[in-house]
Image (cartoon, rainbow, N blue to C red):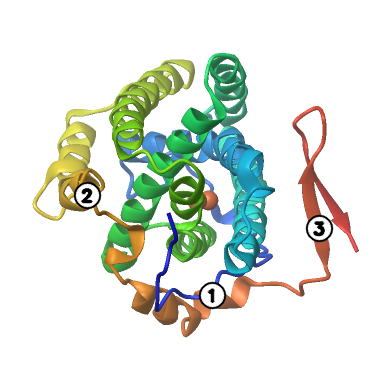
């Protein structure tokens, strides 16, 4: 199925530099241990998760003849590779605060390897498309409600804004690959439903596990604050509900919602200044799943 979308922003893999030394407390998210562990766990899922996003798209890359989509795939891979690299560094900082993030990374890596023994290439791609939609609408929520990021350490806020901007930039790449080569909406919807259940239960399990390992028992105040953060009137999950359901429409496309103004606002802000000279270093993952940075 040909994909013709207008007004898409250019995708560009940026190399950023953050210093996470200002993360000096476990409850870095407004003092709330539940919201903090949620984002520590989410960060832990990025290195193995985004590696799988890259690999699942690579399985189809050679069959894409559209030159523009080929270029977008290249930048998508570059962006996700950078996200993975930066979150690996962040996960070390979270680990120092007791959140056991490298352990969660390793567990998820094993789970993905196990799952991939049973999933077809089409199903792996459908899962990636589904996760990309979830990350895009979460990114839209944060970029549109930046007041919820005000209490974060500056390095974390900077990484968060950069990652969310790039998730919006490349939000249609996996979808367009899927529609071009697979084009099965029922299969896609089924995987979105499965991914939603899988992601929710996995996050909950890892979060409980990391609280137990960190010997951190949430207080009543933490529970109340977390409920407001996720499900309150301005809550993250409550506000993601409608854009999430849009995915199930038969004519859905990620750029039905043009939120390129959020990208433009970030580019004009001080947070875009964390980009470093493009030739400063390259990063890749070796056979032992270690992120390697090479100064070039
Ligand atoms: Fe990403
Ligand atoms: Fe992504």
Instruction: Kindly report the distance in space between the C-alpha atoms of the residues bearing marks 2 and 3.
Output: 34 Å
User: Would you say the residues marked 2 and 3 are in contact, meaning their CB atoms lie under 8 Å apart?
Assistant: no
Element under label 3?
Answer: strand
Tell me residue 179's x, y (percent). Answer: 43, 49
Label number found at residue 240? 2
**Name of the residue lying farthest toward the front:** 1
Q: Is residue 128 left or right of residue 273?
A: left
**Disc on res. 282:** 3
> Which residue is painted at 33% across and 25% down in the image?
194
Mark sitting earlier along the chain (1/3): 1
For disc 2, the neighbor class at 10 Å (few under 14, some 14 to 19, many from 20) is: some
Element assignment for label 2 = helix
Kindly report the distance in space between the C-alpha atoms of the residues bearing marks 2 and 1: 25 Å
Q: Is residue 150 visible?
A: no
Looking at the image, is mark 2 or mark 1 earlier in the sequence? 1
Look at 44% across and 36% down and name the residue there. 126
Label 1, on which residue? Answer: 10
């Amino acid at each position: 199925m040909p994909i013709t979308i207008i007004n898409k922003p250019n995708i560009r893999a940026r190399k950023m530099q953050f210093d996470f030394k200002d993360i000096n407390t476990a409850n870095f998210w407004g003092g709330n241990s539940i919201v903090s562990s949620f984002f520590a766990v989410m960060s832990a899922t990025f290195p193995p998760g985004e590696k799988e996003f890259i690999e699942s798209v690579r399985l189809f890359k050679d069959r894409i003849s559209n030159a523009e989509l080929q270029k977008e795939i290249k930048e998508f891979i570059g962006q996700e590779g950078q996200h993975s690299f930066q979150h690996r560094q962040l996960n070390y900082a979270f680990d120092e605060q007791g959140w056991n993030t490298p352990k969660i990374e390793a567990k998820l890596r094993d789970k993905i390897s196990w799952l991939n023994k049973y999933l077809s290439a089409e199903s792996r791609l459908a899962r990636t498309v589904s996760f990309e939609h979830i990350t895009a609408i979460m990114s839209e929520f944060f970029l549109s409600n930046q007041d919820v990021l005000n209490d974060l350490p500056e390095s974390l806020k900077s990484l968060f804004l950069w990652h969310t901007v790039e998730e919006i930039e490349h939000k249609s790449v996996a979808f367009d690959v899927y529609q071009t080569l697979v084009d099965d909406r029922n299969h896609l919807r089924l995987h979105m439903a499965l991914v939603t259940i899988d992601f929710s239960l996995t996050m909950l399990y890892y979060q409980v596990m990391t609280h137990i390992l960190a010997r951190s028992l949430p207080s009543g105040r933490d529970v109340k604050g977390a409920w407001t953060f996720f499900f309150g009137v301005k809550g993250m999950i409550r506000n993601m509900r409608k854009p999430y359901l849009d995915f199930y429409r038969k004519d859905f496309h990620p750029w039905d919602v043009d939120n390129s103004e959020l990208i433009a606002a970030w580019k004009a802000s001080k947070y875009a200044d964390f980009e470093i000279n493009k030739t400063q270093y390259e990063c890749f993952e070796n056979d032992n799943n270690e992120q390697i940075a090479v100064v070039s």
